[in-house]
Image (spheres, rainbow, N blue to C red):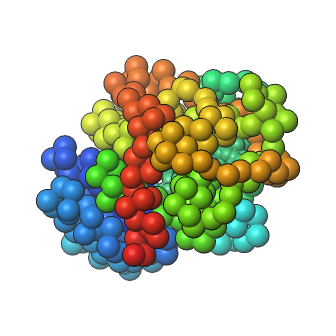
Amino acid sequence: MKVLVTGGTGYIGSHTCIQLIKQGHTPVVIDNLCNSKEMVLDRIEQVTGARPAFMQGDIRDSAFLKKVFAEYSIDSVIHFAGLKAVGESVEKPLKYYDNNVSGTLNLVREMQAANVKSLIFSSSATVYGDPASVPIKEDFPTSATNPYGRSKLMVEECLQDFHHANPDWSITLLRYFNPVGAHESGLLGEDPQGTPNNLLPFVAQVAVGRREKLGVFGNDYPTPDGTGVRDYIHVVDLADGHLAALDKMAHQPGTHIFNLGTGQGNSVLEMVHAFEAAAKRSIPYEIKPRRAGDIAECYADPAYAKATLGWTATRDLQTMVKDTWRWQSKNPNGYWD
Ligand code: NAD
Ligand code: WQD
């Protein structure tokens, strides 16, 4: 299939391009490069031997999208392009609603104009807000605790309304838990700009000497060691989840919703200790107050994805931290080296 990958030079998009190529699909990448570098395409080519077609541009730019759909005969769209920094979204909510919500509406409008009716959307476990219990199933109530989360929830709701009016479309909403890890080659990985918001990139930058120590946000949660528990999933497993969704759902009309997680919860300190073992060095940390908006525990019930897509995450915690460390130690400054 010829698959338009929006945000395809980003962290999850680039790993998905690799899996698409490996399975015989043809990705066409669009990205405005606001949070990634074109060099990622070189790395994809190094790994797969194939360089995806690339057009630089913004999903909010209708003329640009018209050109993309006119140039390539697209079968299906995997839509990663978006902004994802929770803290920034609180400071600049309009930026997030414009990019994530208006951008997606514009994309869908241009898909409709081009008669492309198959969409996979990057949603997030953040749409479950503070869940009443874990593991989390797809039919749990949804809510948002910040503008980023609300932008994902709004898009989910807009797409469901859109599907109601356009029942021949296939729309798949994939709710990712906590993506971590890197490609096993060490050539691709997560490359946050500025201070990392997420745990594992921060730990990796401490390990490589770019930062002095990790702040652990709270050790008084009702969890076994008091630190927050999350469902960390290897980015290549996550990418494979998109491939499974493409195979099974892309031509099945409906709105399909799946959790992409492992079903396993790990605490902050478990992650730190696993990373120390992989990197063979200690990670200095200090306990800090809880971070506003954080919840104690969040992990998936991935049974529906397994039953319906035949997909399950296979890479364990050791592989996640080992691959993160290989990427970080080979590329101490990410793609900027
Ligand atoms: P990323 O920032 O690495 O990738 C997103 C890409 O989209 C970047 O390359 C960026 O340049 C591009 N982009 C942003 N706005 C654009 C626009 N208007 N037009 C064109 N390109 C644009 O992020 P990621 O971690 O790969 O996340 C991909 C998607 O998955 C995002 O939608 C994110 O919200 C969602 N998601 C991520 C996580 C996570 O923890 N990484 C968790 C759940 C959901
Ligand atoms: C994980 C755990 C922190 C950093 C976020 C978004 C979510 C989704 C994934 C996009 C928590 C603790 C973290 C640090 C720490 N993104 N922590 N010190 O908050 O589960 O989810 O990314 O959709 O929407 O909210 O991930 O990696 O930030 O935090 O102690 O420096 O690590 O308190 O318990 P989170 P995270």
Residue 278 location, x and y as percent?
47, 42
Apparent side of residue 23 relative to residue 94 in the rendered image (left or right): left
Q: In the image, residue 223 lies at what x, y percent?
A: 76, 28
Q: Is residue 147 left or right of residue 178?
A: right
Classify the position of the C terminus by image quarter: bottom left
Return the residue nearer the eye: 147 or 284.
Answer: 284
Residue under the point 34% across and 74% down:
38
Q: Residue placed at 67% from the left, 40% from the top? A: 268
Picture layout, residue 290 above or below residue 27: above
Q: How many labels does the image show?
A: 0
**Residue occupying the point 85% across, 50% down:** 289
For image coordinates 59% across by 53% down, the residue present is: 203
State whether residue 149 appears in this view. Answer: no
Q: Is residue 130 left or right of residue 206?
A: right
Above or below residue 262? Residue 83 is below
Q: Which of 207 and 124 is in front in this view?
A: 207
Viewer-closest of 326 and 255: 326
Q: In this view, does 331 lie above or below 162?
A: below
- Say whether residue 295 is visible: yes
Q: Position of residue 273 (x, y in %)?
A: 59, 38
Kindly give the residue lying farthest to the front in the view shown.
281
User: Residue 183: x percent and y percent?
Assistant: 34, 50
**Residue 59 sits above or below residue 48 on the image:** below
Query: In the figure, is residue 3 to the left or right of 306?
Result: left
Q: Which residue lies furthest to the bottom in this view?
A: 63
